[in-house]
Amino acid sequence: MQNYQVQDRFRDDDVEQEVNLRDYFLIVWKRKFIVLTILAVVFLFTAISTFKKIPVYTSAAEVLIERNRGSSGLESQYYSYDPDFLETQSAIIKSAKVARRVVESQKLATTYRTYFFEDNTSSSSFLASIKSEISGFIRKLLVREDNTEKGEGDGGSIEAGLRGEPLTDEDIIAMMIQGGLAVQPVNNSKIVSITYTHKSPAIAKLVADAVSQAYIDELLDMKLTTSRYALQWMTAKADEERKKLEASEKAMQQYMRDNDLVTVENRLAISPQRLTEFSSQLSKAQADRKALEDISRQIDLAGNNVFQLENIPVFAENAVLKSLRETIFKARQNITELSKKFGAKHPLMIKANDELGQLLTQQQAEINRVVATTKNSFELAKSNESNLQELLDTTKSELLNLNERFIQFSIMKRDVDANRVVYEALTSSIKKEGVTEQSQSVNVWILKNAFLPGAPSHPNKKRSLALGLILGLMGGIGCAFLIEYLDNTVKSEKDLETRYGLTVLGSVEQLKEKGSNIESHIVRKPLSPLAESYRLIRSGLLLSAAERPPKTILITSMNAQEGKTTTTINIARVLSQGGKKVLIIDCDLRRPRVHSVFAMQNDKGLSNFLTGNLQENIIHKIPGEEIHVISSGPIPPNPSELVSSRKLQSLVAKMAENFDFVLLDSPPVQSVADSLALTRIVDGTLVVVRAGVTTYDMLQGGLKKLKDVQCHLLGCVLNGQSKRNASGSSYYGYTTYYAKDSEA
């Protein structure tokens, strides 16, 4: 074995373990008494409660519920998808009003009263009175919780509850019906199942059918109540709107009369057109006036110069002047030709000159006329422009004034139109509501009447017992795993190997024989499984080192009462049975026990030797065995100083020369530091772990202390192992094998 293998494999955190089905089964098998106890208790409780329950019967009716989409001309509005529709209808079916209708229609408070109230007149026991008081208190609580759901329609029960008066039989039976009623919509359909549960099958059927009919009656009553209220409200509102419409119409007529707005719309259509025409005419007049002004200026600049005047367009384009110019041109040509033939005083020449003069006179007269006409046209154009400007300004003013009056007229007209629309809508709604008053917004058809149940629906004894069995088994297994999870003690060799990497030299089974002493058991029964377990530990010790087995071995534990002294003595015995000379040194100077096992005196021992107060031989031979013992001696006041002394180290070294094996029984690691000091003077240390007692935290802390002092850990011994926890151990092998020898 290598020096302290735990140094490499030990970790602070627990190692994750892969748990298989066999491990689960072993946990359940180990805790089988807890599992069976919980199973028996749960099953017994279920059986008692099942057979004590009063059987009840359930009857169901089915109804088809859908919205009334309306017909053409009545309800043409669009209905969107409403996922809460069936839930709302279910709440109405389970409402207090429907339950009260059932009570009244079926006379449940009189004819069938005995099915809802037990006759306790003959019972005067104390338990009956207590039950009556509890029932009354619960009913009061139900009334207080149910007051918010009943509304004004349940007047009697509401007022009675508010005044603190006792409930009537009708109210109590209605609450019972609500408690036993169940409404379940059928998936992916508009069908609703209405079920009622009661201890009488006939009452279950009666109430289930009555609830369906009461639900239909309640819907119709709700519709009629809503329609009547709506008609009353709309009639009053329509009368109010009619008065508003009349008042607004009268105000508009008076305004039109006061402002002469009879033809206001025609005038508003004509005035903009006139404004446009005047604006266009004014522009044209301004252009004409400007043109005439330019011509007049040119005439003034030309003066009496005929040639300059003729260049002005108005003169150049004049037809008379054009004709005169041509005639004058011809007359001048004629004079030129005559002058070539005749003299100036020739009659023909005189006549030609006279004709030319007349033509020139006519030309001048025409020019003067054109000038005068142009001047007159210019003045007329200025006057026309001024008149058009005045007309345009007047039209603009009239249009602005008319617009202001028309705006006020439009406001009043909109009020009239709005009032008329509201009034007409209300009138139409009143007519429509009157026509559809008897129609329902929800259509209901009874598809299936309730049936008379032939067998009780609850309790289902077979199912209840099976459920109790399953729950008991699951609860027991769950408790077993919970206890196993909360149990943080070492249970098997596998825990030590997988969690801490420790070498387990062997396991010692817990001795259950009455009156048997484990220290002497292997002497009395050397062929027993217990003796064989210690032989396996001996083999592990002899093979724990490569070159030679350790001669000086310290045997310790994490805490007291874990079997380190017993393990020390039994290992010494199996070593001596192999022909070895063994010495046991009781180094537990605080609570020594080796001397009591061998029935020795403890007045002289190790403590006397270490203090130097004894020179005698302190080694005692056990009669009949090859075992020698050095007892602890009297308990000293300073045990830690004594076990840490060089004298003890020398003693152990000297004893190792004289004996084949020297076993040191030391105090627990977690209690005192004595064992940590002793690990330095031995070849190896053996740790005793008690199954079901040593906790993981305790073992982890102790191993850490041993690691800190660089202890050579040979391995560990699992003491007190039970068969049910011995998963993976060798108990099942050699226990059976040595059974006959043990009995012999």
Image (tube, grey):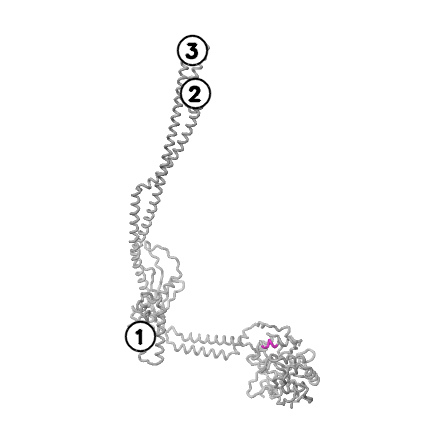
Name the residue at 30% across, 45% down. 255
Give the total number of marks visible in the rendering: 3
Bounds of the magenta span?
698-702
Q: Amino acid at mark 3?
A: Met
| Magenta highlight: main SS | helix
Q: Amino acid at mark 1?
A: Thr
Query: Which is more foreground, mark 3 or mark 2?
Result: 2
Q: Amino acid at mark 2?
A: Asn
How crowded pointer 2 is (Cα within 10 Å; few <14, some 14-19, many 20+) is rated as: few
Q: Quadrant of residue 319?
A: top left
Instruction: Give the camera-side residue of 82 and 237.
Output: 237
Q: Which residue is mark 2?
A: 304
Q: Where does the C terminus fall, quadrant-wise?
A: bottom right
Left or right relative to 358: residue 716:
right
> Is residue 393 in view from this perspective?
yes
Q: Which residue is mark 3?
A: 349
Secondary structure at numbered mark 1: helix
Name the disc covering residue 114, or none: 1
Location of residue 514 in the rendering, given as x and y in whole percent from the top left corner: 55, 87
